[in-house]
Image (spheres, rainbow, N blue to C red):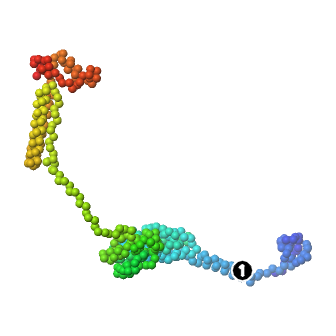
Amino acid sequence: MLVSLTVGKVDAGVTVLLTPDKRLIEFPSILLPPNITSGSIVDITVSRNHGSEETADQRFAALQDQIFNAFGASEPVAPVLRCRNATQTSVVLEWDPIELATADLISLSLYRNGQKAGNIPRPLHMHSTKISGLAVDTEYAFHLVLRTSAGTMASPQVVVRTHKMTDLSGITITTGILPAGQRDGLAKAVERIGAKIVDGVRIDTTHFVTTEGRGMAWEKAVEMNIPVVRPEWVEACETNGRILGVTKFYLDALRPGPPESEETTPKASAQVPDQQQTKSLPPDPPAENGNGAAATGEKKEAEESSDDDDDDSDDNEDGGAADSEKAEEKAKSADAEQKMRLEDKDTQKVALRPGQAAASGKEEGTEGDDEDGGVDEKQPAPSPGDGASFQDVAL
């Protein structure tokens, strides 16, 4: 297509061209022929370049394919879980390295029997884990769940059954420093019980057997909380035909020695029966009253009652339970009789003359009177022989 245009204004960068229908077109001055001035007429041929278009399309398609192959062709892959080792109370699980493609990792979780057991720390670097504290001879189902920015994928379930106490195939032993002869004997014993010996301390190592607590392997076993036991533990397991606890076989535990002689404890002295040890106590002495003779008589009766009680107690020791019951009944009757006599003595009141009544009232005054007059409340009342005639006493 040929187009004739009239040159209008010419500048260093842009030239204004006029079409036959008086339209303005800005055209780069560098593309015009030299020595062009205002009023010059130029012919411009315009055509479509199909080859260039095809080449540009091919280049664009190749770039799109490169981007797709780099970021859109691959997807995250679900992890594959498998059991590495199982014992009576623990299971070691492992899986292949995680393939995330171009997605971002969110988390990797372990599920046990359909419930979340926890997240795997550093999932891009850790490819195994150990689950402890399981029940003996019990079936468990495990699976992993991978969460990424491209979606969530779950691994197939792995069913594991823990071993019985008599199944020693799950024991994995790493040996430390051992004498040559003892090492050979340990290897044969391990083979007989169906266990295995591995080189180096691994995540599936269940026991570290050594006779000396030193070395790099021993330090790693201690760091990983692996039981460090003596070779006698393997021999004990073989003898008993079942797995045994390691408490008595720890390397730093005391070796079993001869049983200590039992200390003889002094025999407890034979206790006298309560009926033979218990003796009736003598009754309390009666309170003083105005009649000194009565008090003396009551004192004699109390002593006689006490003597009777002592005699009864001696009889009880010789005669047994029957005599004891009789002695108790006799003591009770004596106490009751003495109490009645005391009550009778308290009910007897001595009538004093008017002159002595005032003195008696002063003696029986309050504490304030005692403080003022210094009269003792415990001063006995005058007896009939203290200046009073027999007629003045009211019986």
Query: Quick check: 240 left or right of 361?
Result: right
Q: Quadrant of residue 194?
A: bottom left
Q: Quadrant of the N terminus?
A: bottom right
From the viewer's perspective, is residue 59 above or below residue 256? below
Residue 361 percent across, percent down from the top left: 21, 20
Residue at image point 91% right, 73% down = 37
Q: Mark 1: few, some, or many residues within 10 Å (few <14, many ≥20)?
A: few
For this orientation, the residue located farthest to the bottom is 51
Residue at image point 25% right, 61% down = 263
Closer-to-camera residue (354/79): 354
Residue 156 seen anywhere in this rendered image of the structure: no
Closer-to-camera residue (358/383): 383
Three-letter code for the amino acid on which mark 1 is drawn: Ala
Write down the residue under mark 1. Answer: 56
Query: Quick check: 347 left or right of 133?
Result: left
Residue 56 seen anywhere in this rendered image of the structure: yes
- Label 1: state its secondary structure: helix
Closer-to-camera residue (218/181): 181
Residue at image point 20% right, 55% down = 268
Q: Quadrant of the C terminus?
A: top left
Residue 250 percent across, percent down from the top left: 38, 70
